[in-house]
Image (cartoon, rainbow, N blue to C red):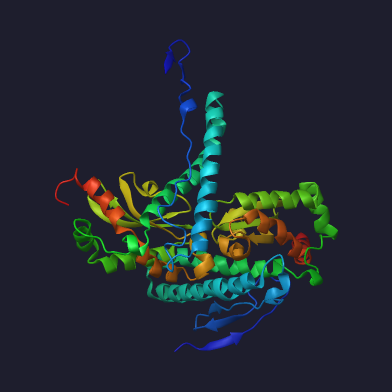
Amino acid sequence: MSLDVGTGKTTMEPCLESMKTASLPDLPYAYDALEPAISEEIMRLHHLKHHQTYVTNYNKALDHLRSALSSGDHSSVVKLQSQIKFNGGGHVNHAIFWKNLAPVHEGGGKPPQDPLSSAIDAHFGSLEELMQKMNSEGAAVQGSGWVWFGLDKELKRLVVETTANQDPLVTKGSHLVPLIGIDVWEHAYYPQYKNARAEYLKNIWTVINWKYASDIFEKHNRGLNEF
Amino acid sequence: MAIRSVASRRTLSSLKESSSKLLGLRGIQTFTLPDLPYDYSALEPAISGEIMQIHHQKHHQTYVTNYNNALEQLDQAVNKGDASTVVKLHSAIKFNGGGHVNHSIFWKNLAPVNQGGGEPPKGALGGAIDTHFGSLEGLVKKMSAEGAALQGSGWVWLGLDKELKKLVVDTTANQDPLVTKGGSLVPLVGIDVWEHAYYLQYKNVRPDYLKNVWKVINWKYASEVYESECK
């Protein structure tokens, strides 16, 4: 950055030129691998259409952002924030979601071990109670959104939260780390479960990848004292 | 035990509930699912019979059921002077009441082709559309674009601003009725863009749904509402 002391203006180097674009991550399993909890049809649409669209539109928005910044069009920079938040959030959230799921034969549904297991018992009483809480909050989301199981790094505790539309968990608190997110947009379950979101939530636990959640938890736990 | 009396009112051009029951001595009304004025399959191929049946019998019914539950809880909380609960209930009332209001309008916004569905508006409304949007195509394009761009769940509306005496296109989130965007707004046509409104047939392609739904839009009803508000 160079500072023009005379006029008080600053100019940015074109750092955005080397800006990385987002790309659709591959699923770590076959589209039918989560059946019967989540149908192949849903997994295909969800990954190849919905997530891909978020990636495409996020990249487009970033492109427009680069142009707007280059031309000093701050009105457009601000106007683009909604597209960036929505599509970028969609990309971030779904990238986590695919890792939150695993086929049964790869550990999907297998309960977490310590230290996450003890932490869950300490905060929610038991794994069942955590699941129940997430199911009821997920079912109660009005419209589209996500239900999250997260770690509050600052307060050193586990939380259940919901976010609207494609808002990532961090929008509910910058020290929140997502461990598990469950998509409760209708596209996540409708072809299979129709309006019965509660059924979808009941069944999805059979393919939740607690190993991944434990890895994230332990990574952040290392820096913390006794949890 | 509260006395229930059934009071049924059906008014075609009225936006009021088509049937309601009186519950309790204070007269808190509960609501029931209005019948569709056509068969579930009558809007095909624009909207599949499967979607219409689930949309009406499951989604709208659930809003009605949950709205009634919230109203009963509200009645109790008000009687007890439990202001905290009264306030806490506002979310369930707005969401489910809004869902009931919006879908009741929606079923009237649609008609089978053989009952005038898709037939362009004539008379006063037709003229007003040309004045405000250039043409019906212009209006359709604008509503389809705004409906497609809606982030998450919601509705796209053609409304009349009674105060400013002009037609508007607006969107609302989730089950917010049009009036939440302005106290003088009257809904003429609302299109549900929640995924449940189209997913089974159109999957993720909301724009295709929006392109096709116009073939079964009931402009006669919209005209009636417009003319009655313009008196």
Can the viewer see residue A108?
Answer: no
Determine which quarter of the picture holds residue B199: bottom right
The location of residue A88, given as percent across then percent down, is 47, 43
Q: Nearer the viewer, residue A141 or A93?
A: A93
Percent position of residue B58, x then y: 55, 74
Let me know if residue B66 appears in the view.
yes
Query: Residue at horizontal 77%, vertical 59%?
Result: B230
What is the quadrant of residue A1 in the picture? top left
Q: Position of residue B45 (x, y in %)?
A: 72, 67
Percent across and percent down for residue B223 are: 78, 63
Q: Quick one: A215 or B158, which is closer to the camera? A: A215
* Residue at (66, 73) in percent of width and height: B49
Identify the residue at image location x=57%, y=61%. Answer: B195
Quarter in which the C terminus of chain B is drawn: bottom right
Residue A26 in the image: above or below residue B64: above
Vertical arrangement, residue A221 with respect to residue B71, above or below: above
Relative vertical location of residue A131 with respect to residue A44 in this rendering, above or below:
below
B48 relative to A109 in the view: left or right: right
Residue farthest toward the right in the current orientation of the protein: B123
